[in-house]
């Protein structure tokens, strides 16, 4: 199993900077390197996944862990991008551990929580407890770009609809998982 600090260091060392509306041409920008890493990770641990292109160099990956007897469904969501590295005084992509702390862009937001999510998913896939939750792990493109994030959400919703049985099934799923609330009808 991959240790959380190693997962975090791997992710921090992969630039996934959101241009934040700037016109840019640099290998530091966009999430494609992180998406490639996640694709290899999910393949290695044997969890089915779907790569969903949202925009050029920007793809979601939705993975699904399916136990023998699912007790419920949990949706984990994390974004892949980081904010720009302007004015950083350390190597933003060094992933250096010093005195028990890992430094680099995204170490806290959001690659730290992504590492914990990946570790938990890898453990589920390895141990395969019979009566555990079904887990849908969505690693999405930027919430900082409203149009990209809307497209990303639509792609995930379409995937859930397709794998769970249509619009009514999607609504039931979202309600059952308390992702949306039932609206009062007048």
Image: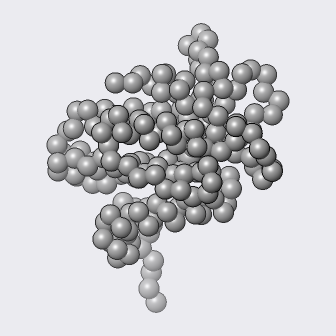
Find residue 180 and report its image quarter.
bottom left
Residue drawn at x 32%, y 35% is 45
Visual colour scheme: one colour
Residue drawn at x 65%, y 21% is 94
How many numbered circles does the render carry? 0
Q: Can you say whether 138 is above or below 46 in the image? A: below
Find residue 41 and report its image quarter.
top left
Q: Can you say whether 105 is above or below 49 in the image? A: above
- Residue 88, position in %: x, y? 78, 27
- Residue 49, position in %: x, y? 38, 49
The answer to whether residue 77 shows anywhere in this view is no
Residue drawn at x 55%, y 35% is 111
With 33 as the anchor, is 93 left or right in this view? right
Q: Can you say whether 112 is above or below 145 in the image? A: above
- Residue 17, position in %: x, y? 68, 40
The answer to whether residue 162 shows anywhere in this view is yes
Q: Can you say whether 182 is above or below 33 in the image? A: below
With 50 as the anchor, is 108 left or right in this view? right
Q: Determine the residue located farthest toward the bottom in the rendered image.
A: 186
Q: Nearer the viewer, residue 66 or 28?
A: 28
Residue drawn at x 60%, y 51% is 58
In the rendered view of the protein, which quadrant contains the N terminus?
top left
- Residue 99, position in %: x, y? 59, 10
With 99 as the anchor, is 172 left or right in this view? left
């Amino acid at each position: 199993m991959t240790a959380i600090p190693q997962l975090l260091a791997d992710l921090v060392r992969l630039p996934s900077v959101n241009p934040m509306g700037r016109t840019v041409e640099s290998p530091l920008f966009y999430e494609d390197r992180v998406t490639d890493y996640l694709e290899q990770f999910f393949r290695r641990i044997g969890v089915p996944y779907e790569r969903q292109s949202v925009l050029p160099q920007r793809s979601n990956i939705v993975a699904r862990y399916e136990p023998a007897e699912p007790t419920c469904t949990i949706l984990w969501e994390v974004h892949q991008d980081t904010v720009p590295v302007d004015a950083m005084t350390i190597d933003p992509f060094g992933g250096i551990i010093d005195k028990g702390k890992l430094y680099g862009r995204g170490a806290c937001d959001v690659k730290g929580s992504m590492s914990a999510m990946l570790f938990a998913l890898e453990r589920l896939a390895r141990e395969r407890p019979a009566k555990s939750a079904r887990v849908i792990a969505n690693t999405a493109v930027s919430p900082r770009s409203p149009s990209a994030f809307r497209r990303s959400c639509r792609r995930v919703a379409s995937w859930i609809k397709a794998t769970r049985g249509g619009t009514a099934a999607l609504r039931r799923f979202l309600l059952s998982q308390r992702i949306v609330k039932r609206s009062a009808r007048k």
